[in-house]
Image (tube, helix red, strand yellow):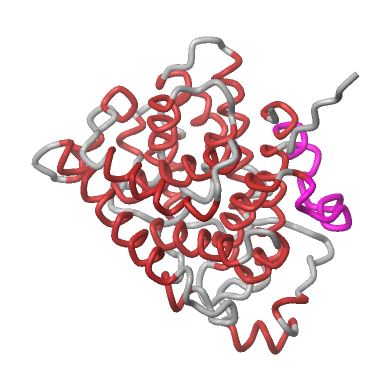
Amino acid sequence: MNTVVTKRAATGALTGLALGDALARPTEFIGVPKILDWYGPWRTMELPTPARVTDDTQMTLALGRGLRAALDRGLFTPEGLERAVRVEFVEWYRSPENNRAPGRTCLDACGLLQSDRPWQDASQVGSKGCGANMRVAPLGLAPGLSEEQRAGAAQLQSALTHGHPTALAASDLTAHAVRLLAEGAEPTGLIGLLRSYAYENRTRYHAVWLGDLWTRAGDPSPEHFIARGWDECLEILERLQRVVHTVSPETDPCLVTGEGWIAEEALATGLLCFLLFVDEPVTAVRRAACTSGDSDSIACLAGAFAGAHLGADAWPDAWADRIEYRDELLALGALWDV
């Protein structure tokens, strides 16, 4: 009898995201020279003990729980997803465990989401911080969604907190990249696939999922609103395409594609760390952790990309077995592994 062995992409991606987060938690804000001084050569950085994560993983899990609840109800709708994720984001906001230096945009938006006002009134339409695309991986992993559902849902979950069109586009692109890698896309062609996707969707406003969000930003039309975001993402993807084969792995990636505090730079710098070490996932997250910018979010993304590509076996048991929230990460991964 033949046994089919899957790579378990969902488990790999979620584990990689959390490992990158925990590895980079101590290195955020301190700069590369100090990281090297405190922790030694970046290629030998070790997972801290205990392996605690930041709000990046916490919000990924909150989104994952909300997505699972929405899918369990049968018909997957914008209203169902918004309600379920809103509950999870507010619960995260109120939790005593929400003490991992969360971003101001998430705190402000989730505070407003506690009321019964329309979610568009809570959305921070001026913020394109990376807090939305670092958590979007579950939408790239959940099976059975149409391309329209995946894109709309990725943008909606962003808009609950980060309503800037670049935050929406970067979240959509991040989920798409995770999905492509989980399905076996070759990393060498990934940037080209993402650029094509961005061009195809440049003026597509997902009104069913976003409602009248665009009116809050002062744009003349929904198409103009969303195109602003896709154009910024296209610009950074084009820069990434130019440098990915020439940059030295020893160069701080933030010097090439940005520090990652904003959505499009986090996407590009996380992708760069992954693409520099496609077959060395631990090295990829170590490179991401030793950066001058938003190290934990960059490492989250690099870990999610690497895990989606290589699967659960990408990560050493000595690391994976002691990551915080391990049981919940495994449960979600097992639900979505195909």
In the rendered image, residue 88 lying in the magenta stretch gets the answer no
Residue at horizontal 22 percent and vertical 50 percent from the top: 228
Q: Is residue 224 left or right of residue 250?
A: left
Residue sitting farthest toward the front:
1
Magenta extent: 313-332
Q: Is residue 210 left or right of residue 150?
A: left
The quarter in which the N terminus is drawn is: top right
Q: In which quarter of the image is residue 49?
A: bottom right
Residue 32 visible in the shown view: yes
Vertical relation: 263 (above or below) 161: below
The quarter in which the C terminus is drawn is: top right
Q: In this view, does 248 lie to the left or right of 303?
A: left
Q: Quadrant of residue 241?
A: bottom left
From the viewer's side, name the closer residue of 289 and 215.
289
Residue at horizontal 72 percent and vertical 56 percent from the top: 19
In the rendered image, residue 327 lying in the magenta stretch gets the answer yes
Residue at horizontal 55 percent and vertical 43 percent from the top: 185
**Spot occupied by residue 271 in the image (x, y as percentages of width and height):** 51, 59
Residue 22 visible in the shown view: no
Q: In this view, does 136 lie to the left or right of 77?
A: right
**Spot occupied by residue 309 in the image (x, y as percentages of width and height):** 63, 47
